[in-house]
Amino acid sequence: MISTAANGYNLIKEKIIELIIKRFIRLTVTVVTLGWVKYLYFLEVSRWIYKIFVAAIDQNLLKIQY
């Protein structure tokens, strides 16, 4: 009787640990994915800002020349 209860407890403990590990892995994957999305978005935005900046400098240089 005692061994059955202990086995049940160990089984529950294993299931809980397994669940925690799965949740942790899922959370890690989500955080990494969001990090990549943010990084790519940042690259895209910075590229657009750079293009606008270069275009503005070109316009000013054209104004100075004429």
Image (cartoon, helix red, strand yellow):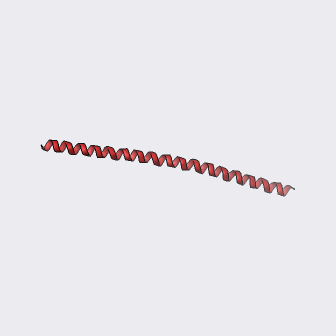
- Residue at position x 71%, y 54% in the image: 53
Could you tell me residue 35's position as x and y percent? Answer: 51, 49
- Residue at position x 15%, y 42% in the image: 3
Q: Which residue lies furthest to the right in this view?
A: 66
Could you tell me residue 59's position as x and y percent? Answer: 79, 55
- Residue at position x 67%, y 51% in the image: 48
* Picture layout, residue 53 above or below residue 33: below
Could you tell me residue 66's position as x and y percent? Answer: 87, 56
The total of numbered circles placed on residues is 0
Quadrant in which the N terminus is drawn: top left
Q: In this view, does 54 lie to the left or right of 19?
A: right
Corner quadrant of residue 12: top left
- Residue at position x 83%, y 57% in the image: 63
Q: Residue furthest left?
A: 1
Q: In this view, does 61 lie to the left or right of 33?
A: right
* Picture layout, residue 30 above or below residue 66: above
Q: In this view, does 53 lie to the left or right of 24?
A: right
Q: Which of 65 and 18 is in front in this view?
A: 18
